[in-house]
Image (tube, rainbow, N blue to C red):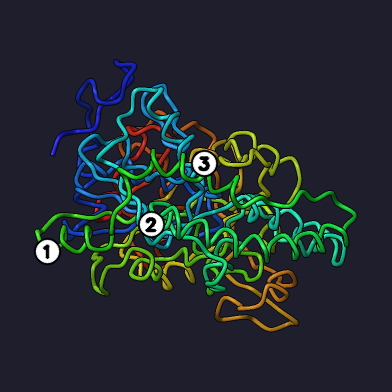
Amino acid sequence: MSMVPDVADSSRPGDAPRERGAGAWERLVPSGRNACVVGLQFGDEGKGQIVDAITDRFDYVTRFNGGNNAGHSVRIGDQKFALHLIPSGILNPSAINVIGNGVVVDPEGILAEIDGLVSRGVAVGENLKISTRAHVVLPWHKTQDRLMELALHKSRGEQDTIGTTGRGIGPCYADKAQRSTAVRMGDLLHPDLLLRQLQGAASVKNVMLAALAAHLDEPFEPFEPRQLHETLLGQARRLAPHLCDTSALLRQAMREGRRVLFEGANAALLDVDHGTFPFVTSSNTTALGIHAGAGVPGGSVSDVLGVVKCYTSRVGGGPSATQFDDETANHLRKVGNEFGTTTGRPRRIGWLDLMAVRYAAQLNGCTGLVCTGLAVLSGLKTIRAATEYRLAGKVLTEFPYSADDLWRVEPGYAEFPGFEESISDCRRYEDLPEAARRFVREIARFVEVPVRAVCVGPAREQMLPVPAAG
């Protein structure tokens, strides 16, 4: 397979060869087979960088959950790409990028994303496939998202609101379960069927949302299904070449010995079943969601890479056990650029929560970890990490299921010596200061999963493979 270009010397991805960090592939994917990259915290761990670093060894890069509420940032040379629905492998000209059936797709959003990439010289054509079974985010989903959040704020207060991005993701997944008001991407190719679906759904949505808006004293304009039908058909004409049965595509690829990289959106602690419910997203964000969300059989994935940021950040509502708010938090937020890729919202900051990370790593069946954000800790005299929870005077041995308990737990911290020097220019793991390497070793020891690479910045060359001895 061809190498992904390094656009530091070229204005267009695809124009020039690029170099990889020595040993990155062998350390991260020792099986040499199919793999998955997932975040082990609340998102924004830097998954896009890891996918980008190894994508040239895979034939397919596949999203299996979420919508355009997720954002992956990838830096190539002096260019930064913010990806939302399209997999990070789109920057590798030799990879086929797949949006699986478990994703919910906003037609307007993905077309804007395609146009943005093409305007910057990224080829988007036969290398992008979208499942005909993926569900469609419609305008009323966004209205419902906004009104529901307002209703929760009015009835419960700010602490109990979800902190949704307002992109209509949750209501779209709700309609997927409701079934009768849902539309799938393949339906966009059948105008008569689509019109009937829109008319039926609009008759329900207009009544429901008008009542909710009136309750909140908010304006509401009823949705006109024929007008929406015309808009969707125009979008469908552009998206039609990308639509196919992606499940069959991936299964055939695997039978032929092709390698597939599965890219998780959001992160483990936002999983609708296993995260900090109800302050979660609306899909299965862990590796457990791969098989249903991509339509591939169990046992398809050999290596699961869990991405761990060396501190905690969270955007939106919900508990974060190690959160703090002082000058150190402001420093970490500024140095780490802790503002949402999709929303621009400032993220809440906390120390690394090893109790949560260990739970997430076990849940995902991680075979290796990648640590990001280590360079953000430079200059701190002391680094802390939570290694236990106490609740009502008792030490918890497992991550609690209840968000109410997580609001009330008292984390117990281990303290580690910090490191004064900047590490962003280090290009070998062995060049890191001993205090930084000690912290990495403690993460691996506590989580009981080896750390296979450390990132000291967002650029490709800033991912440092960790020797087997650690």
Disc 1 is placed on an element classified as helix
Q: Which residue does the numbered mark 1 point to in the structure image? A: 255
In the image: residue 26, left or right of residue 406: left
Give whichever of discs 2 and 3 has the lower sequence position. Answer: 3
Give whichever of discs 2 and 1 has the lower sequence position. Answer: 2
**Which mark lies nearer to you, 3 or 1?**
3
Which is nearer the eye, 213 or 114?
Answer: 213
Q: In the picture shown, does residue 70 fall above or below 385?
A: above
Residue beneath the point at 56% across and 51% down? 311
**Which mark lies nearer to you, 2 or 3?**
2
Which is nearer the eye, 28 or 73?
Answer: 73
Disc 2 is placed on an element classified as helix
Q: Which residue does the numbered mark 2 point to in the structure image? A: 186
Do callouts 2 and 1 mark residues in contact (Cβ within 8 Å)? Answer: no
Q: In the picture shown, does residue 299 fall above or below 340?
A: below
For badge 2, the amino acid type reads Gly
**Which mark lies nearer to you, 2 or 1?**
2
Residue 141: where, in percent of width, then height? Answer: 63, 56
Label 3 to label 1: alpha-carbon separation: 33 Å
Disc 3 is placed on an element classified as helix
